[in-house]
Image: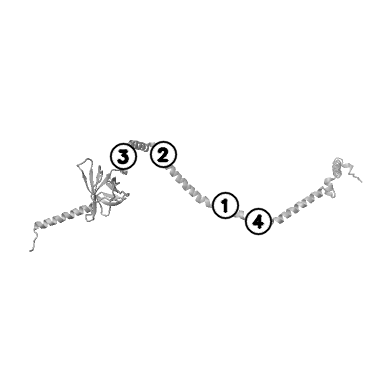
Amino acid sequence: MKHAFTKEAKIGLVTLVSLILLYIGINYLKGINLFKPVNHYFITFSDVRDLTVSSPIYVDGYKVGLVRSINYDYSTVDKIVVEVSLDKEMRVNKDSYVTISKSLLGGADLYLHLNKYTSEFIKSGSYIEGRIEGDMMSSLQENLLPGVVDLLPKIDSILAGLQAIVNHPALSQSLTQIERTTNNLELSTKQLNSLLNKDVPLIVGNLKTISDNFVSVSEEFNGLDYRGLFAEIDQTLSNLKETTEKLNSKENSIGLLLNDRSLYDNLNQTSANAASLLQDLQENPKRYVHFSLF
């Protein structure tokens, strides 16, 4: 017998399938894979801080599961039960514990600390101890924020002082003088570059000419016959010595003239007599000149 679905049954079936797909899609967006086999565990905390459903749980930095639900236990005080799902292959050692740590981008993550000193494992559905430990963000908030709050008035005072310095007329004048100095320095640099480009090649050319002349003079000195020159100087000195010895000797006329005192005195006396005779001739010419008339 053939069964026909009514219109209402078809609508109900489509609605059910849609709800199932919606549930699967929402969990998929949360990172929960409904088709992946997992083990469920429960963790108790006194404060879940920024923890949310689908927050990850890590072991040694590797993601091994997600938070499935967070519920407050009204039967006791300060007790919040967090249900987590871990990978089927993830086995939890006995006496392991879980901590909450705030992430840098907001929210919180769970960290599972395994007790590696035992080979005994707990079963799925068991409770794991939850601990509240100080994290980096909490330490920053507790230690740095009070200091930052105390620094704010000082920072405002410093900013006000900087603003006063910036608005002071002397700063504007100093900047203007610095600009002028910079412009003068730039002009001086250009003039120095121009001077160097103009005069340095000339100086280098003169130095090259002097160097060439020095090389030429050195070559001329190198070409001299020093041995012959010294021989000529030695011969000249020998001749001068010989002449000096002859002048000092009484064996020649010049030597006698220079060294014989009596000859010198006779010559001196003769010169004096000649001068006296010449003077007498000038004064009494008649004594020496006679005229006769016929």
Please tell me how crowded label 4 is: few (under 14), some (14-19), or many (20+) other residues with Cα within 10 Å: few
- Residue type marked 3: Glu
C-alpha gap between disc 3 and disc 4:
92 Å
Q: Is residue 153 above or below residue 12?
A: above
Point out residue 124 in the picture as x, y percentages from the top left corner. Answer: 24, 51
Q: Quadrant of residue 140?
A: top left
Residue farthest to the right, as pictured: 294
First reached walking from the N terminus: tag 3 or tag 4: 3
The residue that disc 4 covers is 222
C-alpha gap between disc 3 and disc 2:
45 Å
Picture disc at residue 207: 1
The residue that disc 3 covers is 142
C-alpha gap between disc 2 and disc 1:
46 Å
- Residue type marked 1: Leu
C-alpha gap between disc 2 and disc 4:
66 Å
**Is 123 left, or right, of 238 in this rendering?**
left
Q: Is residue 181 above or below residue 231?
A: above
Q: Are marks 3 and 4 in contact (CB under 8 Å)?
A: no
First reached walking from the N terminus: tag 1 or tag 3: 3
First reached walking from the N terminus: tag 2 or tag 1: 2
Task: Label 3, secondary structure: give it.
Answer: helix
Task: Label 2, secondary structure: give it.
Answer: helix
Task: Label 1, secondary structure: give it.
Answer: helix
Point out residue 199 in the picture as x, y percentages from the top left corner. Answer: 52, 50
Task: Label 4, secondary structure: give it.
Answer: helix
The residue that disc 2 covers is 174
Q: Are marks 1 and 3 in contact (CB under 8 Å)?
A: no
First reached walking from the N terminus: tag 3 or tag 2: 3
- Residue type marked 4: Asn
- Circle nearer the viewer, 1 or 3: 3
